[in-house]
Amino acid sequence: QAQLAESGGGLVQPGGSLKLSCAVSGFVFINYNMRWYRQAPGKERELVAHIDTTGRRANYLDSVRGRFTISRDNVKKALYLQMNSLRPEDTAVYYCHARYPGHTDGHWGHGTQVTVSS
C-alpha cells in the first residue's frame, strides 16, 4: 500500500525558511512524477511544484518561482521542498503527491501545516 508522509512544517516568521520532506513507501518511487500541492483555508488546493522522475525537470507556481526549490532523492525515496523568503500568503497545508506518468490519479500524503506569521 502506498504511503507518503510529510514532515518539516511549522511556524515561521515572514522572510524565513523551511524545508519540507516527504518519505514514501509501498510503490516504486523512481517511476513516479512527484508534486507538492498546498491548500489554504477557504481556498482550492493548488499545485506548487512538480518534478519529473529523473529530478532534472521542475516546474513551479508563478508566485513561488525563485523562492521554492523542489528536489528528490531516488535512493532515499524522498521528496523535498526548500522554501525561502516565506510570505504570509504561503500559509497552507502542504501535501506530497505521486503520480505515475500517463495516469490521472495518484497517491496523497496527509499534509503538513506551514504557517507564516510574525
Image (cartoon, grey):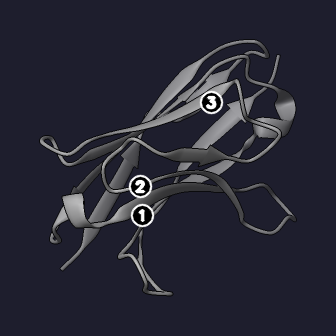
Q: Residue at x 87, y 65 (%)?
A: 42
Helix, strand or loop for disc 3: strand
> Amino acid type of disc 3?
Phe
Residue toward you, 35 or 58 = 58
Helix, strand or loop for disc 2: loop
What quarter of the picture does the N terminus occupy?
bottom left
Q: Residue at x 79, y 16 (%)?
A: 14
Residue toward you, 71 or 43 = 71
Q: Residue at x 80, y 69 (%)?
A: 44
Foreground disc of the pair 2, 3: 2
Residue toward you, 38 or 69 = 69
Residue 43 locus on image (x, y percent)? 85, 64
Compared to residue 63, the image places residue 101 above or below, namely below
Of marks 2 and 1, which one's residue comes earlier in the chain?
Answer: 2
Q: Which residue is mark 3?
A: 68
Disc ID at residue 109: 1
